[in-house]
Image: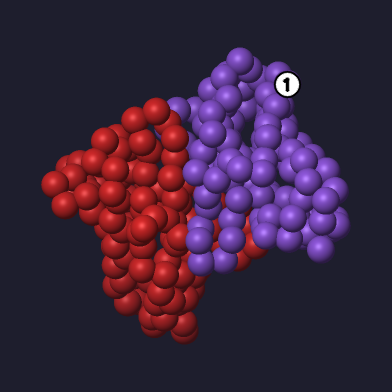
Amino acid sequence: RKEVEQDPGPFNVPEGATVAFNCTYSNSASQSFFWYRQDCRKEPKLLMSVYSSGNEDGRFTAQLNRASQYISLLIRDSKLSDSATYLCVVNRNNNDMRFGAGTRLTVKP
Amino acid sequence: DADVTQTPRNRITKTGKRIMLECSQTKGHDRMYWYRQDPGLGLQLIYYSFDVKDINKGEISDGYSVSRQAQAKFSLSLESAIPNQTALYFCATSDNRELFFGEGSRLTVL
């Protein structure tokens, strides 16, 4: 079992839809958490960090539940440009960063 | 110019050959990483380094070795390449918060 698990999708949604991705991690000592975005044939790039109190960046909201070892990403009012693979990333206590396999999102007109 | 540069970007080689993938960075970060990406498996950590004298194994280090020649350079070697090492390889640096990736090196082992 992978240390960081994500639903691979694909999620196919219409423009304007709200979509949520989940991620679970198994290492309870993990210290920090992130969502990265990867476009097709490109390198991953940081989308947002995930804080214990939850945080929002425009149309994107991230949540962390340490007790359940669960992270989520909510995208509101989806745009065509949101089409990408979303990677859940967990930082263990020594800056050893572990990735989920990613969830693919396609937003359609 | 990219902050994290990987060479070569694409390489096709044969089983048993020695291959080196190179990574250099201009961000001044101490932390550097090598990952491989396979379809359906996401990115898996091969090796990481927190400074020139520090090398750490990741999830899948068998069959690979690394060298941290300077703060700015971190190379990955496959001493005897095998077909299941065919993958997309990413180098990354970190400022202790965010990972910054190179554009990737696509390796095919025949």
Q: Is residue B66 visible to the viewer in this orientation of the structure?
A: yes
Task: Please give the count of numbered marks on the rendered protein.
Answer: 1
Q: Is residue A18 above or below residue A50?
A: below
Residue B54 image-quadrant placement: top right
Which residue does the image show at 59% across and 56% down from the upper left?
B37
Q: Chain of mark 1?
A: B
Residue A6 in the image, given as x and y percentages of width and height: 36, 62
Q: Amino acid at mark 1?
A: Gln
Query: Which residue sits at x=28%, y=49%?
Result: A26
User: Residue B6 appears in which quarter of the rendering?
Assistant: top right
Residue visible at 22% across and 50% down in the picture: A69
> Badge 1, how many Cα within 10 Å: few under 14, some, many 20+?
few
Colour chosen for chain A: red
Q: Position of residue A85 (x, y in %)?
A: 48, 64
The residue singled out by tag 1 in the image is: B69
The chain coloured purple in the image: B
Q: Is residue A29 above or below residue B51?
A: below
Image position of A56 (left or right of B60): left
Q: Secondary structure at mark 1?
A: strand
> Which image quarter holds the N terminus of chain A?
bottom left
* Front position in the image: B95 or A92: A92
* Residue drawn at 44 percent across, 35 percent down: A96
**x, y percentage for residue A83?**
49, 70
The correct choice, above or below, for B70 with respect to A13 in the image is: above
Q: Which image quarter: residue A19?
A: bottom left
User: Is residue B101 among what the camera can see?
Assistant: no
Answer with left or right where residue B65 lies relative to residue A14. right
| Frontmost residue, A65 versus B88 | B88
Question: Is B106 on the left-hand or right-hand side of B34?
Answer: right
Residue A91 in percent (x, y) is at 38, 38
